[in-house]
């Protein structure tokens, strides 16, 4: 209950931040009255041919692509019959930071003639009417700027953007898009239902204060996910109509609060696929109206307005709706998870494409889609969309990629084409001016890197379709079960190359089916991984080397467990070196001695480097903790325990040499074992030794226990570090890119010259948090997206007021108790506090470092690095050579 009221309190604070104040509304109302007066005072113009536009002054261009220019019809300007405020401002659902007021201007009936619905005559008259208003308004000092824009980037619907002058100006963004309608006839119908939509929404909002708050929350939710702007977006108007639909269907009632409206709407979106089963606001069953099946044949997503004639989702691709649906499902899971701060995650966390998707790639030249329309035989669809080849080809390209990546990708999404506003004296933007198009791939980790596409058997009818789809890549193959099938095998040797198999698929399919050359595709799936490559450029990123180390370690562990002749049995063998949890930046490379560079001393089994030969390579030892069973034979004196452990080191070396022919070198504190080119450093541990080190005898002769530096260090080495390593080893098995993400992060920390100020274990835990608590995202499936999320976590987490709780092995349940205790003892705790199931109260990995100053420096560097990196990765002309250079220093990857 307390958590529910906490969320409600946060929602009220958010609504106060995003809704308009009364003083602002008064300024807007006054501005609208002045616009109305100016409109009514614009003089009429004489009637001319549509193609005779000499009456327009040179300072104003017609905001419409008049191709071909020649068309019949006449035009004259007559002041509008009605000026009406429509949209979210009138309903009270307009939110900051972008304040948009939609004004519908009704053109007089007398300026139209018969057949104006043909050959773009209506659209041209609409554009000329707008151009004349723009020319008159450009003279007025009332306006700070007068510009054109496309409504929701729909080139058939130019609009006029008016901003107030000087001190009267307020933050003013793009106008809220009206119902998007790409098809020619629907674009005319849309203008006829503006007022009826307003009345419909006004009726729904009457006596329903929760609708206003709910719509504000839903708009914030859409904005954070970049779903509310551009061609085919899920606009504020569209979500308003959806809430009205749910009210009509009694899935929402007027007693509900804004939070309940948000939940009910997300629940509907999560469970309803409008690309399969459309919905309609039309109440009356009229045989003359088209049915939902008719709309499904023409559009990918169907949501019919109250008139029964207009599809509100006409511009939306099925891919974009599936993205909305996926986000709604994920949001409902988060809202139902008591361990997650749903308010913070859903409404206050941005989800840009680079962090939301595992791989992102750009189509650098949108003009290539013109050739794609021809290649894919979309000329009829191109005509229907008024020549807009971007809007025509996009749904087919996404559908093509979704089929090619089926099984590998959970989601194939695209950015929404957006055309910026333009000056009234400039020509309207061309279709290619949408800039590069961005696509995002969200992977199924188990199958994304598969090298095989297995098709139907060769004698099945589907085999021809498979061969046609994959082209020359398809070939007949015999499989182990004896079947002969069509198949595609992708070339990839290393794990890094396998992660980029989706890139091979994307490039191949776009070239084969859409005639889009590889040079037009900028694929940014693994640009940062070059800094963790080992050896030559064509080599992998170290995963294979790490697996080799772990396999050798596992084999040594089995040999230790099965050793015969030890007085006490080995109860556990636990690695503590970063390579044994897959997070060593550059994993150990197996080294074989070059005998010609050494002098052999046979009696001691030694190789002594020769003075005249090059110095042998250094082999870093991989530390392993070897726990021996508890027994009454163990002494209770700390010095005696050390001597017993030294004896065990000697005996382990002797038995490993005798039973497994391993070269060993014992020492007092450890035994080094040379195996498979690696050196493993065995350190014997006794579970009661830390407790014995804590024993202190008081002057009164009393025995008490207190932490000492020696006991703390031993606990760290023999208890906490092995637990951390085994937990993160398990995390790597669940999420194969965890280790590579850690290594990428450590390279960044080193490049900032801060590796001495933050421990490796701390970095590993920060990255583990991204995989264990990914909300609102899914766990990363590429090191690059994991690295970007790490920078965001470091830069935005409230380290002063919150502990970072990393729930390793799902071993924590009382997270609130940790938070309460943290708040109570904040002044005595480290500046960066990380809690785990085995370390709830002390944050042992950050006790000594980083300091306040270093943490602040890290936050600034992370914020700047993230900003610059995302700018470069989203710029297809500049993203192949990624470098971050704040304050004149190369501070990201060296």
Image (tube, rainbow, N blue to C red):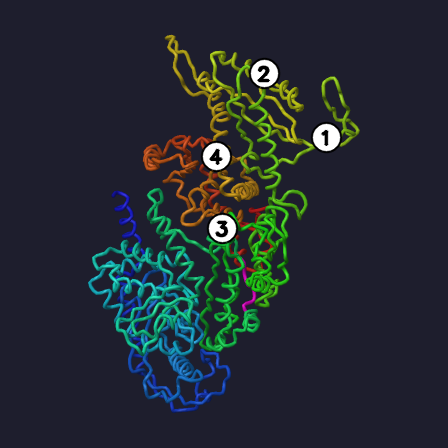
Residues shaded magenta = 361-366
Nearest to the eye among marks 3 and 1: give it: 3
The answer to if 363 sits in the magenta stretch is yes
In the rendered image, residue 433, in percent from the top left (x then y), is placed at 51, 70
From where the camera sits, is residue 165 visible? no
Name the residue that disc number 3 marks.
Answer: 444
Q: Residue at x 44, y 18 (%)?
A: 691
Q: Are marks 4 and 2 in contact (CB under 8 Å)?
A: no
Q: Secondary structure at mark 2?
A: loop
Name the residue that disc number 1 marks.
Answer: 593
Dividing the picture into quadrants, the one containing residue 328 is bottom left
Q: Secondary structure at mark 4?
A: helix
Precedes in sequence: disc 3 or disc 2? 3
Report the Cα–Cα distance between label 3 and label 2. 49 Å
Query: 10 Å neighbourhood of mark 1: few (<14), some, or many (≥20)?
Result: few
Nearest to the eye among marks 3 and 2: give it: 2
In the rendered image, residue 538, in percent from the top left (x then y), is placed at 66, 48
User: Which residue is nearer to you in this view: 616 or 453?
Assistant: 453
Report the Cα–Cα distance between label 3 and label 4. 23 Å
Nearest to the eye among marks 1 and 2: give it: 2
User: Which residue is nearer to you in this view: 1 or 250?
Assistant: 250
Name the residue that disc number 2 marks.
Answer: 565
350 above or below 655? below
Name the residue that disc number 4 marks.
Answer: 727
Q: Residue at x 48, y 45 (%)?
A: 790
């Amino acid at each position: 209950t307390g958590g529910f009221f906490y969320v409600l309190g946060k929602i009220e604070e958010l609504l106060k931040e995003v809704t308009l104040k009364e003083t602002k509304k008064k300024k807007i109302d006054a501005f609208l009255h002045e616009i109305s007066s100016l409109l009514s005072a614009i003089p009429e113009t004489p009637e001319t041919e549509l193609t005779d536009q000499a009456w327009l002054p040179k300072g104003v261009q017609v905001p419409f692509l008049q191709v071909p220019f020649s068309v019949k019809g006449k035009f004259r300007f007559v002041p509008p019959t009605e000026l009406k405020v429509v949209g979210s401002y009138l309903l009270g659902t307009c939110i900051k930071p972008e304040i948009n007021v939609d004004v519908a201007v009704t053109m007089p009936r007398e300026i139209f003639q018969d057949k104006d619905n043909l050959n773009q005559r209506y659209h041209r008259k609409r554009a000329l009417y707008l151009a004349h208003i723009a020319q008159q308004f450009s003279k007025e000092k009332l306006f700070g700027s007068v510009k054109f824009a496309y409504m929701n980037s729909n080139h058939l619907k130019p609009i006029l953007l008016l901003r107030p002058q000087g001190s009267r100006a307020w933050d003013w963004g793009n106008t809220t898009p009206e119902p998007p309608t790409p098809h020619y006839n629907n674009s005319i119908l849309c203008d006829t239902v503006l007022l009826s939509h307003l009345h419909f929404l006004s009726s729904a909002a009457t006596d329903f204060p929760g609708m206003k708050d709910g719509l504000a929350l839903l708009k914030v939710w859409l904005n954070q996910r970049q779903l509310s702007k551009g061609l085919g977006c899920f606009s504020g108007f569209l979500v308003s109509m959806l809430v009205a639909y749910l009210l009509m269907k009694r899935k929402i009632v007027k007693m509900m609060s804004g939070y309940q409206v948000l939940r009910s709407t997300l629940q509907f979106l999560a469970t309803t696929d409008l690309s399969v089963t459309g919905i309609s606001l039309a109440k009356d069953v009229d045989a003359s109206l088209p049915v939902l099946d008719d709309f499904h044949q023409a559009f990918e997503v169907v949501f019919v307005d109250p008139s029964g004639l207009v599809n509100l989702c006409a511009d939306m691709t099925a891919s974009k709706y599936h993205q909305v649906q996926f986000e709604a499902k994920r949001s409902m899971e988060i809202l139902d998870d008591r361990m997650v701060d749903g308010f913070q995650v859903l409404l206050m966390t941005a989800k840009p494409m680079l962090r939301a998707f595992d791989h992102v790639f750009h189509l650098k030249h949108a003009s290539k889609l013109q050739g794609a329309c021809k290649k894919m035989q979309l000329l009829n669809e191109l005509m229907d969309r008024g020549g807009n080849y971007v809007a025509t080809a996009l749904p087919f390209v996404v559908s093509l990629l979704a089929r090619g990546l089926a099984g590998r990708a959970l989601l194939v999404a695209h950015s929404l084409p957006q055309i910026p506003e333009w000056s009234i004296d400039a020509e309207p933007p061309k279709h290619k001016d949408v800039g590069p198009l961005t696509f995002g791939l969200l992977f199924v980790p188990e199958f994304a890197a598969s090298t095989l596409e297995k098709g139907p058997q060769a004698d099945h009818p589907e085999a021809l379709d498979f061969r046609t789809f994959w082209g020359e890549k398809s070939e007949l193959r015999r499989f182990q079960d004896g079947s002969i099938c069509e198949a595609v095998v992708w070339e990839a040797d290393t794990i890094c190359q396998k992660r980029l198999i989706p890139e091979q698929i994307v490039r191949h399919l776009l070239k084969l089916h859409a005639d889009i050359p590889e040079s037009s595709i900028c694929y940014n799936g693994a640009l940062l991984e070059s800094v963790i490559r080992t050896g030559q450029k064509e080599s992998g990123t170290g995963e294979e080397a790490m697996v080799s180390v772990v396999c050798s370690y596992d084999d040594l562990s089995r040999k230790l467990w099965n050793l015969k002749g030890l007085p006490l049995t080995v109860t556990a063998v636990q690695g503590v070196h970063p390579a044994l949890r897959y997070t060593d930046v550059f994993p150990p490379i197996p080294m074989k001695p070059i005998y010609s560079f050494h002098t052999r001393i046979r009696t001691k089994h030694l190789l002594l480097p020769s003075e005249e030969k090059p110095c042998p390579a250094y082999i870093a030892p991989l530390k392993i903790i070897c726990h021996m069973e508890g027994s009454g034979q163990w002494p209770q004196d700390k010095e005696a325990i050390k001597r017993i452990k030294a004896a065990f080191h000697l005996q382990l070396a002797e038995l490993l040499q005798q039973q497994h022919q391993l070269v060993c070198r014992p020492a007092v504190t450890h035994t080094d074992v040379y195996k498979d080119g690696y050196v493993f450093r065995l350190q014997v541990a006794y579970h009661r030794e830390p407790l014995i080190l804590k024993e202190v005898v008081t002057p009164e002769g009393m025995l008490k226990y207190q932490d000492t530096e020696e006991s703390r260090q031993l606990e760290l080495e023999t208890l906490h570090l092995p637990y951390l390593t085994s937990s993160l080893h398990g995390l790597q098995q669940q999420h194969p890119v965890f280790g590579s993400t850690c290594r990428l992060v450590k390279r960044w920390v080193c490049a900032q010259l801060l590796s001495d100020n933050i421990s490796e274990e701390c970095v590993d835990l920060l990255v583990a948090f991204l995989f264990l608590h990914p909300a609102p995202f899914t766990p990363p499936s590429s090191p690059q997206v994991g690295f970007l999320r790490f920078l965001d976590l470091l830069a935005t987490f409230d380290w002063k007021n919150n502990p970072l709780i990393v729930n390793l092995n799902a071993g924590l349940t009382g997270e609130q108790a940790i938070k309460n205790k943290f708040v109570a003892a904040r002044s005595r705790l480290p500046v960066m506090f990380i809690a785990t199931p085995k370390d709830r109260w002390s944050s042992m990995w950050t006790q000594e470092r980083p300091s306040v100053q270093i943490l602040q420096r890290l936050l600034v560097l992370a914020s700047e690095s993230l900003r610059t990196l995302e700018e470069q990765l989203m710029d297809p002309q500049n993203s192949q050579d990624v470098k971050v250079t704040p304050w004149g220093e190369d501070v990201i990857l060296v």
